[in-house]
């Protein structure tokens, strides 16, 4: 039985559905990220769980209890906001202790619990400082400590690292994962940053227009996107719509404009019986000189139209018999514009999508 279940949830703003018949199960101790573009419904989902929004229909179950109508102050959930939402006139100690004082916890217990939680977030010795004396990362750790001090049943993050610079974001996401695993607390994390979500999550839900397109572990989503939307969102920029298909042993052979492609169903999350669209990352297409031999399958001639320097290598836009494709290649000896080349599509990197 899942710790948290959203069952056929619908949420609307101004009569426009943001979530429609939305379903999500989260297991105890799991960190799940909601990832997707602006307007996909990820923050709406988080605010619904927190109790800031009410579902138009559907049911929210938590610990086998119906939380659909439970008010926000009756949900023992910790919420970490994007802008920290700290009190500037209070010290670090008093910011963290705020929730305990509201709950009428004794002074002795407050001292003990604040000291403990500041140790967990590596802020021991900062008790008397004010928030304006802290760095962005330290403020975020204070916000996390304040959310954790109440010993929440669930921890919620709303784009907590978006206001930090790139290096600090990397450090803080490691800290968040460390804290979450150390405490074993079930966590829902919202972000638009793919790398951030993939690096800290047990499961990632890719959302689009109020639905989950794919819910899986990060490595599987990265290698085996289920839909064209997920594939495009995580960097599969090349799509091939095939004409015909034939099953050959454990592989499927497709054709497009007389070019033959072999796809391995074992590396696909999509319904391989129905899909006729292949996707491949620019990094996974092999580009080589036209003087080299061309394979009978998963290979074709192409012509370089645009060359762009990326630092570690080059990105090419190439004309092919099946349309323009994007290819990345690490090399110190780039191909020239209008140069003829050969492209190879490794069958273990070409995936079918719905």
Image (spheres, rainbow, N blue to C red):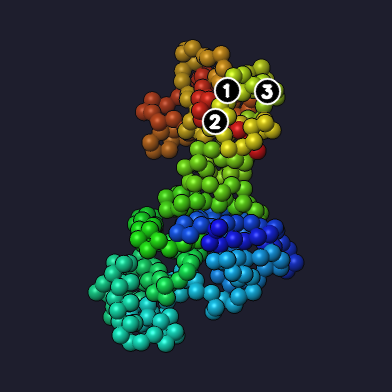
Q: How crowded is mark 3: few (under 14 residues within 10 Å), some or many (20 or more)?
A: some
Q: In this view, does 265 lie to the left or right of 287?
A: right
Q: Is residue 150 left or right of residue 127?
A: right
The percent position of residue 325, horizontal first and vertical second, equals 57, 30
| Crowd class of label 1 (few under 14; some 14 to 19; many from 20; radius 10 Å) | few
Element marked by disc 2: helix
| Distance between mark 1 and mark 3 Cα atoms | 13 Å
Residue 124, horizontal then vertical, whole percent: 26, 72
Look at the picture and state if 13 lies above or below 234: below
- The picture quadrant where one finds residue 246 is top right
- Which of the 4 image quadrants contains residue 169? bottom left
Q: Quadrant of the N terminus?
A: bottom right
Label whose residue precedes the other's in the sequence (1 or 2): 1
Front: mark 1 or 3: 1
Q: Which of 13 and 264 is in front in this view?
A: 264
Q: What element carries label 3?
A: strand
Residues at discs 1 and 2 in contact (Cβ within 8 Å): yes
x then y, percent, for residue 51: 58, 72
Mark 2 sits on what residue? 266
What residue is disc 1 on? 250
Q: Would residue 189 be visible to someone looking at this image?
A: no
Quarter placement of the C terminus:
top right
Residue furthest to the right in view is 15
Distance, label 1 to label 2, CA atoms, is 9 Å
Dot in front, 3 or 2? 2
Residue 245: which disc? 3
Numbered circles on residues, count: 3
């Amino acid at each position: 039985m899942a710790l948290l279940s959203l069952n056929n949830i619908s949420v609307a703003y101004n009569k426009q559905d943001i979530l429609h018949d939305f379903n999500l199960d989260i297991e105890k101790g799991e960190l799940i990220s909601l990832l997707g573009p602006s307007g996909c419904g990820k923050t709406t989902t988080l605010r619904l769980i927190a109790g800031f929004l009410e579902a138009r229909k559907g049911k929210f179950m938590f610990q086998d209890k119906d939380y659909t109508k439970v008010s926000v102050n009756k949900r023992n959930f910790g919420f970490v906001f994007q802008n920290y939402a700290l009190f500037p006139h209070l010290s670090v100690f008093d910011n963290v202790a705020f929730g305990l004082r509201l709950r009428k916890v004794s002074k002795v217990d407050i001292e003990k619990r604040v000291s403990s939680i500041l140790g967990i977030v590596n802020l021991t010795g900062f008790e008397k400082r004010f928030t304006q004396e802290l760095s962005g990362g330290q403020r975020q750790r204070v916000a996390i400590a304040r959310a954790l001090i109440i010993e929440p049943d669930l921890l919620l993050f709303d784009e907590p690292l978006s206001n930090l610079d790139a290096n600090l974001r990397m450090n803080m996401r490691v800290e968040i994962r460390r804290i979450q695993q150390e405490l074993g607390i079930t966590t829902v994390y919202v972000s638009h940053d793919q790398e951030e979500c993939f690096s800290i999550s047990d499961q990632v839900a890719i959302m689009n227009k109020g639905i989950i397109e794919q819910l899986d572990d990060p490595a599987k989503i990265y290698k085996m996107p289920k839909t064209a939307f997920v594939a495009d969102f995580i960097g599969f920029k090349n799509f091939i719509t095939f004409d015909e298909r034939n099953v050959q042993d454990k592989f499927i052979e497709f054709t497009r404009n007389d070019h033959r492609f072999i796809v391995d169903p074992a590396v696909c999350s999509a319904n391989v019986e129905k899909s006729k669209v292949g996707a491949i990352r620019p990094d996974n297409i092999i580009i080589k000189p036209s003087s080299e031999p061309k394979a009978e399958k998963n290979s074709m001639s192409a012509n370089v139209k645009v060359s762009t320097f990326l630092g570690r290598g080059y990105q090419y836009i190439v004309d092919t018999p099946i349309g323009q494709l994007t290819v990345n290649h690490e090399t110190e000896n780039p191909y020239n514009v209008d140069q003829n080349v050969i492209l190879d599509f490794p069958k273990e990197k070409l995936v079918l999508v719905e």
